[in-house]
Image: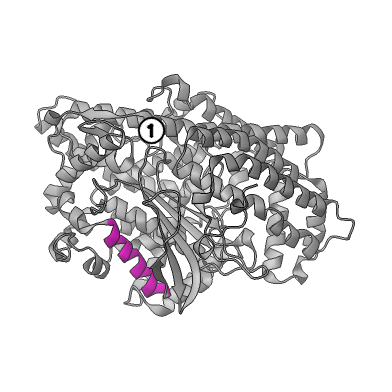
Amino acid sequence: MNPELIRWTGPEGLPRFDLIADKDFAPAFDTALAQAEAAMEAIAANPAAPDFDNTLAAMELAEEPLNRVLSIFYTLAAVDSNDLRQSLQRDFAPRLAAYGSKTGMDPRLYARVRAVAEGADTLEPQDARITTLALRDLTRSGAGLEGAARQRMTEIRGRMAELTTQFSQNVLADERDFVLPVADDRLDGLPDWLIRAMRAAAKERGLQGQVVTLNRSLIVPFLEHATDRALREVAFRAWAARGSGQGANGAETDNLPIAAEILSLRHERAQLLGYEDFAAWKLEPEMAGSAERVEDLLRQVWDAARRRAGDDEARLAAMLHADGVNDRLQPWDWRLYAERLRKETHDFDAARIKPYLTLDAMLGAVFDVANRLFGLEFQPLRAPLWADDVRAWKVTRDGRLMAIFVGDYFARPSKRSGAWCSALQVQHRIGQGQRPIVVNVCNFTPPEQAGAPAFLSWDDARTLFHEFGHATHHILSDVKWPSISGTSVAQDFVELPSQLYEHWLEQPQVLDAHARHCQTGEPLPADLRDRLLAAGKADAGFSTTEYLESALVDLAFHRGQPPADVMARQSAILGALSAPGAIPMRHATPHFAHIFSGDSYASGYYSYMWSEVMDADAFAAFEETGDIFDPATARRLEETILSRGGSLPADELWIAFRERMPGVEALLRGRGLN
């Protein structure tokens, strides 16, 4: 085994990515998996009476070498995929599933954890917490199953690992392989910065001229500005077709049968465990608790969003017809006319703010907010990472090293789409303890040439703040055990820190300090700033509706019998909602990676809005003091939520911070839907 995969020797404990080759992963995986299997077997077969130390504490440490190998591998597979890494993913997935089945369904481990759990009230609080969670997870994994049911559960887990991996790879292939050349005489309406980004995308692919790709930071502004309706339609249809069998790779990347089989297997798994359906199984440990509570929240917001979207649709259709287009408003029209309406209503042109929203300026804002709230300081760290444009920082407080933060911000053809936060290693206090190494990944349009500023859209800036909100959850974590560290919380609670952090981007004092012109250094003019903030709510009907469509489809897919024809079921759900035809789902079924690339957000896409109810109310706690950086409120946020990880149930963490449960009023007000 390449020792660098286990004992990281880079600056401040980072892995030396320059010393790791793809050929190292298979032997390292074999060795680390065998070590984990041996460690778990030793715990299960231990002849000594079960106690916390020889069972739960031992389980927390048993997979450490495997986790280190996989954290490096899956980071690279997501940010810089290649054929070998994809092949290794397909090889690793069923083997990891088999290992998960073996350990998660081991009756000996189950018996030992149950025995410790019977005396959990005598344990230290965090020891008792991981014991309770381990028993819950083993029970929900099927450790209590026997005979044929047990064998079938093992088969389902293995098959699911194969399917979810293939789903992700199909979406990536269709995103990577679509390129739409745009001739010089068809650039009407496109701002200069976007044309430069399209030329950079062409150059990156060895092409001349300018192209549109399915990178969100490119296709969304193209749809907002391109006056060539035919080109907009081609680009939008390609974006919508990812994974449908009609995408860039045709039937080769058809995800529809994969999605149908995943839904069927999830339903079967839930029923094997005694649940009515997958939604009932998935939501049992979440803050929401039941599908009924989730649907109640979503429909409260749906009615307000649908009314606003209907009003906007009528206005945009009138603008389309005024342009001489004798057609209904289509999905590829909405963004163009919404942007025009925003300009007319608020005298606001998004292109005017681009020079003020450089990546470096917005990183300065992100770090400044973290400093003013939590006293964190950031120093650049030179380290060999996986690409030259990936950056790292040391995060300190009062001179003490808290974490290492890594940012990979620019799109590349080999990178998975979207944005996310992960951890190469999580914080814990076992032995000498371990500092977190946190990674934020985005897909912003890179600068046209090296050394030039990278410009962000307002949505890009919001994404930057969002993902760093997740990072604070890791950086400020202060718990004993890795299994409850950082973002290891209920799925519908995990988005609270990230969405809460977004609020500071919208504050005038933050923008005044950091949104400065890339050439002159002048601050964003106050009147432009105010129009920007007002315009931010202008299309709330669209953004809320497209999100809710996806959340309600996800929930319906996992309630009752699974559909044989997923697209027919999707259409029926949207039809029952009277969803606007010009506003498709944010993530249609064939590329709905949140719910089909793994179980994390399956029957849980609602969690963004569930968390938004809390983040709106949490930011109100700062506003009520008259100081958005109020030290006492920031300290309470850190002490009750950000440092606690999953050491308590989510509702207890929330009550400790806010002393009451939130309602939807602040959310509706924040979105301008009240």
Say if residue 555 shows up in the picture: no
Residue 604 magenta-highlighted: no
From the viewer's perspective, tell me whether residue 255 is left or right of residue 43: left
**Residue 509, image x and y in percent?**
25, 70
Residue at image coords 15%, 44%: 192
Question: Most extreme residue toward the top, as rendered?
Answer: 251
Q: Is residue 622 above or below residue 487?
A: below
Residue at image coords 78%, 56%: 113
Callout 1, which amino acid? Arg
Q: Quadrant of residue 667?
A: bottom left
Task: Name the foreground residue: 618 vs 93.
Answer: 93
Q: Quadrant of residue 523?
A: bottom left
Quarter that holds the C terminus: bottom left
Which residue is identified by label 1?
176
Q: Quadrant of residue 498?
A: bottom left
Task: Name the foreground residue: 576 vs 494.
Answer: 494
**Residue 31, image x and y in percent?**
70, 45
State the extent of the magenta-drawn residues as a range. 359-374
The image shows a total of numbered marks equal to 1
**Residue 23, image x and y in percent?**
57, 39
SS category of the residue bearing label 1: helix
From the viewer's perspective, tell me whether residue 429 is left or right of residue 306: right
Residue 366 magenta-highlighted: yes
Residue at image coords 68%, 47%: 32
**Residue 659, image x and y in percent?**
50, 72
